[in-house]
């Protein structure tokens, strides 16, 4: 466990003397920046970093986050590269995918409407008068940001283009570059319904169109939509529309007007 008191003291030191101007510049800089003590503990995060991840309290990060203890970084096998920055080198990492789900869990974030971020990350040391590493800075530049609404539109388009096929939540989530769980949550947030409901509604809409074609029998209309006439979807049609397919066709032909849509 990182010593939070030590990290706060280090932050106060960072804001003293010549470091104060640097700290103010970092805080106002429009790109996310995080500053670490020589042991890897975060001692400063700027406003852009907090805003990016919807973190209101900087002390959710300062003193609590240590770059060498981050499981995602450990898993990536890049720890030895990062250590080189703490030994005085400047290191550059290109097109790194940000582990958003880990960040959400770590800081209890619920409304992060970003599905994926890819960043270029530069990690470089700040040296003291004796040319010794005093702090290490991570400077992050977003290359690509995928926001929830955009990715849900991609998923909706995929469903609409593959409505004749069986529903596959995993495949749809993959198209949207989301985990299955995150996709389901985000889809309902933006549409008000689940992905399966959207698929069902769209497929029933297409079946209703086919039922209006009197050149097709009802069974042929189902076949056109790749739906089993005696299967689950036929029952779902009545639940959704309010009448059976045959009655829907009659009502749509002018023999009635009370159709539930």
Image (cartoon, rainbow, N blue to C red):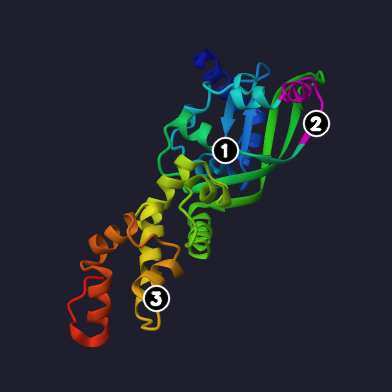
Residue 46 in picture, x, y percent from top left: 57, 38
Q: Residues within 10 Å of mark 2 (few under 14, many from 20)?
A: some
- Disc 3 and disc 1 in contact, CB within 8 angstroms: no
Q: Which of marks 3 and 1 is nearer the N terminus?
A: 1
Q: Residues within 10 Å of mark 1 (few under 14, many from 20)?
A: many
Does 88 appear in magenta? yes
Q: In the figure, residue 43 lies in which quadrant? A: top right
Q: Is residue 97 above or below residue 85?
A: below
Return the residue at label 3: 210
Does 103 appear in magenta? no
Q: Which of marks 3 and 1 is in front?
A: 3
Q: Which of marks 3 and 2 is in front?
A: 3
Q: Which quarter of the figure is the C terminus placed in?
A: bottom left
Q: Earlier in the sequence, mark 3 or mark 2?
A: 2
Q: Which mark, by number, is residue 182?
A: none
Residue 192 in picture, x, y percent from top left: 33, 56
Return the residue at label 1: 46
**Separation of residues labelled 3 and 1 (CA atoms):** 57 Å
Q: Earlier in the sequence, mark 1 or mark 2?
A: 1
Instruction: Judge from the rendering whether residue 26 lies leftward or rightward of residue 226; answer left or right.
Output: right
- The residue under the point 52% across, 31% down is 102
**Separation of residues labelled 3 and 2 (CA atoms):** 64 Å
Q: Is residue 103 above or below residue 2?
A: below
Residues rendered magenta in the picture = 77-92
Residue 20 in picture, x, y percent from top left: 62, 32
Q: Is mark 2 on a helix, strand or loop?
A: loop
Return the residue at label 2: 90
């Amino acid at each position: 466990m990182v010593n939070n008191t030590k990290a706060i003291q280090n932050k106060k030191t960072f804001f003293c003397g010549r470091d104060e101007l640097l700290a103010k510049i970092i805080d106002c800089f429009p790109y996310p920046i995080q500053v670490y003590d020589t042991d890897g503990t975060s001692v400063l995060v700027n406003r852009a970093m907090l805003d990016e991840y919807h973190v209101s309290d900087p002390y959710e990060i300062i003193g609590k986050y240590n770059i060498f203890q981050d499981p995602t970084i450990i898993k990536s096998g890049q720890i030895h590269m990062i250590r080189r920055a703490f030994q005085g080198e400047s290191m550059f990492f290109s097109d790194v995918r940000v582990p958003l789900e880990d960040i959400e869990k770590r800081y209890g974030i619920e409304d992060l409407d970003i599905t994926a971020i890819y960043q270029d990350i530069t990690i470089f040391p700040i040296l003291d008068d004796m040319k010794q590493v005093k702090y290490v800075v991570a400077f992050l530049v977003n290359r690509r940001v995928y926001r929830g609404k955009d990715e849900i539109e991609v998923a909706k388009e995929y469903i609409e283009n593959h409505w004749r096929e069986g529903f596959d939540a995993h495949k749809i989530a993959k198209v949207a570059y989301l985990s299955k769980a995150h996709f389901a949550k985000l889809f309902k947030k933006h549409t008000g319904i689940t992905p399966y409901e959207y698929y069902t509604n769209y497929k029933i809409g297409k079946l209703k169109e086919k039922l209006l074609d009197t050149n097709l029998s009802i069974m042929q209309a189902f076949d056109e939509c790749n739906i089993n006439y005696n299967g689950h979807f036929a029952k779902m049609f009545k639940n959704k529309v309010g009448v059976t397919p045959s009655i829907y066709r009659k009502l749509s032909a002018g023999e009635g007007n009370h159709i539930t849509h």
